[in-house]
Image: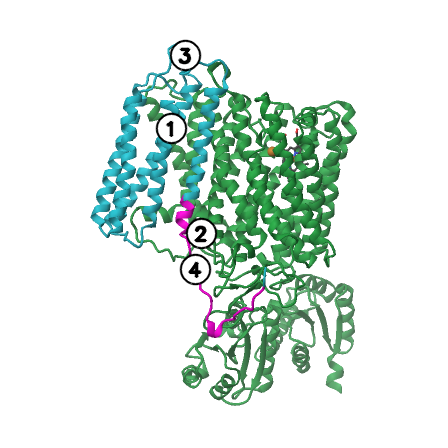
């Protein structure tokens, strides 16, 4: 804690406030950290139900005595949709960096369509699963995890939709695109959580 | 009701109705039976209702505008700062306002929580049932704990840090002012949901809400769960905001090692909040789903697991105890360094120990579950981490003590609280180590030993530290000093009360009295009644605190910039600070706690760019005020006062005599200066012979003012304006000119006269007499004051008769003449004719005017009679008698 002589006003001029990092992006990262922990708490519940409860076979049995079965193949396709959407978004951002607003709009459209398709397929899956959240603890955990994730996809789609609108208004430029970048962080996060979820709930 | 509150009302009601409709339609569409399920409707309505309220109060307007593609200005500051107290009740984006809103709101909930505590203690005053049966008692207990934890202890530091931290860092505001406003408004939503549960059947599973009890509750339980979500959202949003502020908004030169410890404390706490809070959100979602949707997370025979709840819950709630403590540690470090006049001992160790506490804090949660039936291999690791966490805490304790060691200790109220904290928190920390040891915990789990521990920790760590912070920064926040005397009373009553209430609980717990019960074995009667007495003392102490706050805020002594001679940046700006804290970006040049080191300084604060140079409390830039007839007017005095609020200006009043009577001008000037002094404005003044333009130009040359304020009557009545004085001064002097136009009526009444002492003049026969006006005038010249001339008339009976009327009329006329004569010579005076004999009228008048002095102006014998009547009624007020007959005779 050394003291240096203050250079006061005058010839040296007054100090300038410098910003080294973008507070909005830092905040988005922190928020994503927080969201990750929310999913972590739900995964904790899931693992307790899966491993903590004695004498359960896996997959566990439904109330009617049949084992739970999840449509792995269909979901795999769906997973590929969602993962691809992350790349299309990335491509759109790259186009913007090159000054190509049209490219950004295209990239956003494809991303949104892929994300929307994911949601619809997921809802369709719900309708044909053959068990409800009330069935047994496992089904509750399943619906809670996928439901929370679905809600996050929806929020991500809304955010990207707003970005799309702003892109049409030519709001973003290679030098200013904070909302878009924040939105894309969020979208990638939603995507990664899904991959985790797919592996931990559907595959393992 | 303002626009915003009406909108909030419609927003809430609309959202509730909408959610009913939504749930109804969805249930109908998917064929759920039965269509009506109160729990589901209630939960959705609670959630959307809260959001509807937030929309109504205006939290989302900016972002919705952005989403709609509207043209949004980021520089729109229309929701920034307050000009009167009513504006504290609406959305504001100024971190200083939000800080005070936070404190007021959390203390409001603390009062409710405290009331519940007193009810608990009243029920426990004696064995058997006093005021509440078991169910109600559970309600009281749950409400007490929930309010205290979720809407007092956790968010209250958000209030202090919100106010202080941005200034300490040298920033103009938080990184995200609008997010900040949203974080605050989440709080009332959460708190009032908890409180609303009083009407829907109180939740009774305490603040921990373990299933299966929590999965069985009623609507009250749903409100608890939703309230926790809102409170959690509030915490997370503020925490992210604090982190962004700390990372990106520190003033130039403020490296992280030059940051005040409060910055470290807030930063570390915020990391805990961001990463731990989602766990309680998760846990509350799960219990809610179990109860209202029929999932089976916690139903063992359906594959669920109750212990799982406790793991998730405590994974948040143990870090949460540090969320309630670390900011307090920061406050105490500031206070102790300042009042011990020594550099904080082990600054880096202080910072690192907080980081260590936070990291370790994530690895100890299961010490709350030693007897829960969790996996038994977890016990020993958790015991070890728990005991290790005492090490960084000990580092802090020793550092505080070492800071005190050989310090030059000043026992002001904030310091008292800091010392009280050291003792109380130490007690809690020691019993905490006991509880961390598995065999001891098995013995005392769920007994009053735990209650004793938790109150020592929370009272010491949250309540004492918050009080230390409030007593420390109140002068900065309000510009007023708190009463030290009341502060000492508050502290000592609280301190004794705390020990009386919670110390015996250790013994009681060791003897086996379980916690969370409304009745107990008679052998515990004595301790319990002692504790109840102690808790009432705490109640009284809290009343004293609020009294102190209210009275000091209204009429406390004015606070200087730096009453405690602190070194950090907030003490280098005015109290309260200007709207954007700093007029120019400050430069940090050293550490924050270099007390006793010659010439060491933490930072330099600059005056606005136009002036350049450093800004100190006594830095003043001159403003020239030119006025004559309008000197005493409200308009001019207001103008000067509003500039003075900047803290930047000193005022030089110049009154050109022109063709007027010099004495009259002199008197006006003296009155104005007295009024301004009464308002704490630094002003000097002089009367100058000669023409106004010459006088003003000459004065401007001498003092080189930053601005010239010229006050005149309106164009048609002003002699100056008819000669185009303002423009001529503008041409002759170089400084910018502000022209204040004073309406003629306003110019005669004396503005802000309430700042002057009140003198009452009593005269009956003497009104209208030659000498009266002179008497008043000389008194006014001796010391500027405002005067009330009272004429008590001893009227002949009948009082409605012609004689009486004639006297009344004559007295009235004489009074008007006297008053006019005085006013036109610049004296602040009013007159009143009273219809009663002096013995009746004077007590009334003295009661109504509360004069600081009484002057009796009588003629010979009448003077003596009046004086006797006045002295009888005056009490301690000095009475002076003037015999006008003698003066006339002499
Ligand atoms: C006037 C001051 C206070 C009094 C007299 C008081 C009294 C009590 C009592 C007697 C209990 C135990 C009730 C039972 O186990 O049946 C209790 C519980 C509790 N109190 Fe306080 N309290 C006070 C202030 C506070 C403060 C300031 C906090 C936190 C900041 C707090 C937090 C709690 C919590 C969290 C519990 C629940 C403990 C549990 O889970 O069993 N109390 N209080
Ligand atoms: Cu703990």
Q: Quadrant of residue B120?
A: top right
> Which is more foreground, mark 2 or mark 4?
4
Region rendered in magenta: A3-28
- Image quarter of residue B495: top right
Q: Nearer the viewer, residue B230 or B251?
A: B251
Front of the two marks 4 and 3: 4
Residue behind mark 1: A197
3D distance between C-alphas at marks 2 and 4: 19 Å
The image position of residue B403, as x and y in percent, is 69, 53
Q: Residues within 10 Å of mark 2 (few under 14, many from 20)?
A: some
C-alpha span from label 3 to label 1: 24 Å
Foreground residue among B134 and B376: B376
Tell me the residue that label 3 is attached to: A63
Judging by the rendered image, the residue that carries numbered circle 4 is A18
**Toward the viewer: B689 or B563?**
B563
Tell me how far mark 4 sits from mark 3, CA to CA: 62 Å
Q: Please determine whether, in this image, residue B688 is positioned above or below residue B800.
A: below
Q: Position of residue B458 (x, y in %)?
A: 64, 39
Q: Are marks 4 and 1 in contact (CB under 8 Å)?
A: no
Please say if B218 is above or below B61: above
Whether labels 2 and 1 belong to a single chain: the reply is no
In the image, residue A20 sits, relative to residue B813, either above or below, namely: above
N-term-proximal mark, 4 vs 1: 4
Query: Does residue B153 show up?
Result: no
Instruction: Determine the secondary structure under disc 3.
Output: loop
Q: Main secondary structure of the magenta part?
A: loop
Q: Is residue B52 left or right of residue A71?
A: right
Chain containing the residue with disc 1: A
In the picture of the structure, the residue carrying the numbered disc 2 is B177
Marks 2 and 1: CB-CB under 8 Å?
no
Residue at (57% x, 46% y) in the render? B157
């Amino acid at each position: 804690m050394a003291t240096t002589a203050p250079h006061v006003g005058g010839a040296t001029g007054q100090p300038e406030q410098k910003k080294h990092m973008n507070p909005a992006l830092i905040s988005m990262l922190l928020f994503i950290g927080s969201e990750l922990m929310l999913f972590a708490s739900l995964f904790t519940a899931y693992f307790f139900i899966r491993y903590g409860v004695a004498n359960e076979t896996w997959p566990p049995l439904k109330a009617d005595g049949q084992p739970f079965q999840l449509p792995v193949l269909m979901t795999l396709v769906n997973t590929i949709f969602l993962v691809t959407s992350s790349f299309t978004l990335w491509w759109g951002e790259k186009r913007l960096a090159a000054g190509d607003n049209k490219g950004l709009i295209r990239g956003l459209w494809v991303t949104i369509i892929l994300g929307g398709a994911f949601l619809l397929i997921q809802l369709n899956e719900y309708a044909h699963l053959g068990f409800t959240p009330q069935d047994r603890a496992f089904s509750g955990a399943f619906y809670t995890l996928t439901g929370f994730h679905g809600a996050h996809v929806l929020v991500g789609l809304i955010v990207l939709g707003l970005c799309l609108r702003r892109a049409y208004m030519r709001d973003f430029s290679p030098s200013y695109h904070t909302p878009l970048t924040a939105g894309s962080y969020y979208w990638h996060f939603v995507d990664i959580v899904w991959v985790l979820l797919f592996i931990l709930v559907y595959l393992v | 009701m303002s626009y915003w509150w009406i909108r909030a009302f419609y927003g809430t009601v609309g959202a509730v109705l909408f959610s009913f409709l939504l749930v109804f339609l969805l249930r109908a569409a998917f064929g759920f039976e039965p269509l009506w399920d109160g729990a589901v409707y209630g939960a959705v309505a609670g959630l959307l209702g809260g959001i509807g309220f937030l929309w109504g109060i205006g939290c989302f307007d900016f972002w919705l505008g952005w989403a709609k593609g509207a043209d949004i200005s980021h520089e729109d500051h229309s929701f920034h700062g307050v000009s009167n107290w009513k504006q504290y009740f609406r959305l504001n984006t100024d971190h200083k306002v939000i800080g005070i809103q936070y404190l007021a709101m959390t203390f409001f909930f603390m009062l409710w929580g405290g009331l519940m505590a007193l009810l608990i203690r009243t029920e426990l005053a004696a064995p058997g049932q006093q005021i509440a049966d078991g169910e109600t008692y559970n309600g009281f207990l749950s409400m007490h704990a929930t309010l205290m934890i979720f809407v007092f202890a956790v968010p209250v530091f958000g209030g202090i840090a919100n106010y202080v931290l941005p200034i300490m860092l040298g920033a103009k505001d938080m990184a995200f002012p609008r997010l900040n406003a949203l974080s605050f408004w989440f709080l009332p939503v959460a708190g009032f949901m908890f409180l609303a549960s009083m009407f829907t059947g109180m939740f009774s599973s305490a603040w921990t809400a373990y299933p299966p009890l929590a999965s069985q509750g009623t609507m009250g339980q749903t409100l608890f769960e939703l309230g926790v979500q809102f409170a959690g959202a509030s915490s997370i949003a503020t925490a992210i905001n604090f982190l962004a502020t700390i990372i990106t908004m520190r003033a130039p030169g403020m490296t992280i090692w030059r940051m005040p410890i409060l910055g470290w404390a807030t930063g570390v706490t915020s990391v805990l909040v961001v990463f731990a809070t989602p766990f309680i959100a998760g846990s509350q979602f799960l219990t809610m789903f179990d109860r209202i949707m029929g999932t089976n997370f916690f139903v063992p025979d359906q594959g669920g697991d109750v212990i799982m709840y406790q793991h998730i819950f405590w994974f948040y709630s143990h870090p949460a105890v540090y969320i309630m403590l670390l900011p307090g540690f920061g406050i105490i470090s500031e206070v102790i360094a300042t009042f011990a006049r020594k550099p904080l001992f082990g600054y880096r160790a202080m910072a690192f120990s907080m980081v260590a506490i936070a990291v370790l804090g994530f690895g100890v949660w299961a010490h709350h579950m030693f007897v829960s039936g969790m996996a038994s291999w977890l016990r020993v690791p958790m015991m070890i981490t728990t005991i290790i966490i005492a090490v960084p805490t000990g580092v802090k304790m020793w550092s505080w003590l070492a800071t005190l060691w050989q310090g030059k200790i000043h026992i002001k109220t904030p310091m008292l609280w800091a010392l009280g904290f050291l003792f109380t928190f130490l007690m809690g920390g020691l019993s905490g180590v006991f509880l961390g040891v598995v065999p001891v915990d098995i013995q005392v789990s769920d007994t009053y030993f735990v209650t004793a521990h938790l109150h020592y920790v929370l009272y010491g760590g949250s309540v004492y530290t918050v009080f230390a912070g409030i007593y420390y920064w109140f002068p900065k926040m309000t510009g007023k000093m708190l009463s030290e005397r009341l502060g000492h009373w508050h502290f000592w009553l609280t301190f004794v009360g705390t020990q009386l209430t919670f110390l015996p609980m250790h013994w009681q717990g060791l003897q086996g009295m379980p916690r969370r019960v409304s009745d107990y074995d008679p052998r515990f009667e004595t301790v319990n009644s002692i504790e109840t007495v102690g808790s009432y003392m705490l109640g009284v102490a809290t009343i004293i605190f609020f009294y102190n706050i209210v009275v000091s805020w209204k009429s406390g002594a004015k606070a200087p910039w730096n009453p405690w001679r602190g070194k950090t940046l907030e003490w280098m700006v005015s109290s309260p600070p200007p709207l954007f804290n700093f007029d120019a970006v400050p430069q940090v040049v050293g550490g924050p706690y270099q007390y006793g080191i010659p010439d060491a300084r933490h930072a330099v604060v600059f005056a606005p760019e136009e002036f350049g140079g450093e800004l100190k409390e006594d830095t003043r830039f001159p403003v020239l005020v030119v006025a004559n007839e309008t000197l005493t007017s409200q308009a001019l005095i207001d103008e000067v006062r509003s500039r003075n609020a900047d803290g930047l200006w000193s005022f030089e009043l110049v009154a050109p005599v022109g063709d007027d009577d010099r004495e009259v001008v002199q008197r006006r000037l003296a009155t104005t200066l007295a009024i301004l002094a009464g308002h704490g404005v630094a002003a000097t003044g002089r009367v100058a012979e000669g023409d106004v333009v010459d006088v003003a130009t000459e004065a401007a040359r001498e003092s080189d003012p930053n601005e010239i304020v010229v006050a005149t009557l309106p164009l048609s009545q002003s002699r100056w304006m008819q000669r185009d004085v303002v423009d001529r001064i503008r041409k002759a002097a170089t400084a910018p000119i502000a022209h204040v136009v004073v309406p003629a009526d306003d110019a005669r009444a004396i503005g802000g006269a309430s700042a002057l002492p009140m003198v009452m003049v009593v005269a009956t026969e003497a009104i209208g007499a030659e000498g009266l006006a002179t008497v008043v005038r000389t008194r006014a010249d001796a010391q500027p004051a405002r005067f009330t001339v009272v004429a008590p008339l001893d009227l002949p009976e009948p009082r409605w008769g012609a004689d009486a009327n004639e006297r009344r009329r004559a007295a009235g006329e004489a009074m008007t003449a006297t008053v006019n004569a005085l006013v036109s010579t610049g004296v602040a005076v009013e007159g009143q004719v009273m219809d009663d004999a002096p013995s009746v009228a004077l007590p009334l008048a003295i009661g109504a005017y509360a004069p600081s002095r009484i002057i009796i102006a009588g003629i010979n014998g009448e003077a003596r009679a009046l004086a006797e009547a006045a002295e009888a009624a005056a009490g301690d007020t000095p009475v002076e008698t003037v015999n006008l007959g003698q003066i006339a005779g002499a």
